[in-house]
Image (tube, grey):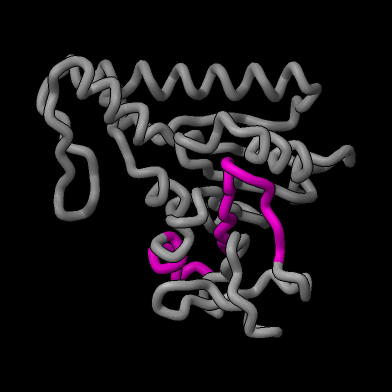
Amino acid sequence: MKDIFEKKILIKGSGDITDSKQFFDFVIEKAGTTFGKYLVVICGGGTKISAALKKAGYTIEFDSMNRRVLHSLEERAIMESVLIHEQTELLNKFVKAGIVNVSVIPPLLHAGSVMCPINGDDLVKACSLGFDEIYILTKPERVMSKHYVFSGYPNIKIVGIDTGEPISFCSCKIPKKYWAGDKYICRVCSKIIQNPIIFYPGE
């Protein structure tokens, strides 16, 4: 049976960059103007969830697998409220821009009537076999850590979004870089890269 979509694209954005113009433009570019594309955007919200929990007087806690630990129904309600707000805001922005071939989902699973929070990166891994293209958008300083998180997933591209200043490639225009202890260096011309853009896991 032929798939109704010619290309399926998954994009996961960290909660502190999904408000940026760079993130919005990236999704718009991937959506394109051609028929047959379908995008799913996983909206993060970790930073905003932590801020909301702290404001409510709760301690921020993660387990050994970097999963958020919530001890009360109120904490779960705060987390869900933040994520649903992020989902609604993003979807409204895309619809207003005329992008209708996109779905926005929060990192939440439901087992029957039980809500199960899931780390956004883990959700991407769980969905990775269903998509033709997958992008993780995060801040440049987190690119290396994401590179290791997804090291076993060569079909996932890590994209650094610098919301403070324009993003630029190295002058040689080759977006492949490596980490050299305390700096990023272009693999081609060996220049130091101030704003790393993309790492290709597995390379």
Position of residue 140 measured from the top left corner of the image (x, y, whole percent)? 51, 55
Q: Is residue 45 left or right of residue 104?
A: left
Q: Is residue 25 left or right of residue 49?
A: right
Position of residue 46 measured from the top left corner of the image (x, y, whole percent)? 35, 35
The C terminus sits in image quarter: bottom right
Task: State whether residue 4 appears in this view.
Answer: no
Task: Reply yes or no: does residue 6 show up in magenta.
Answer: no
Q: Kindly identify the residue that appears in the image at 10 percent across and 27 percent down.
A: 71
Q: Kindly identify the residue that appears in the image at 15 percent across and 47 percent down.
A: 63
Position of residue 126 measured from the top left corner of the image (x, y, whole percent)? 43, 52
Q: Is residue 37 left or right of residue 80?
A: right
Magenta segment, prevailing SS (helix, strand or loop):
loop
Rendered image quadrant of residue 94: top right
- Which residue is at the front of the view, 101 or 59? 59
- Which residue is at the front of the view, 143 or 116? 143
- Which residue is at the front of the view, 83 or 35? 83
- Which residue is at the front of the view, 165 or 116? 165
Q: Is residue 181 left or right of residue 3?
A: left
Number of numbered discs visible in the structure rendering = 0
Looking at the rendering, the stretch of residues picked out in magenta corresponds to 146-169
Q: Kindly identify the residue that appears in the image at 45 percent across and 31 percent down.
A: 106
Rendered image quadrant of residue 79: top left
Task: Reply yes or no: does residue 161 show up in magenta.
Answer: yes
Q: Kindly identify the residue that appears in the image at 59 percent across and 24 percent down.
A: 90
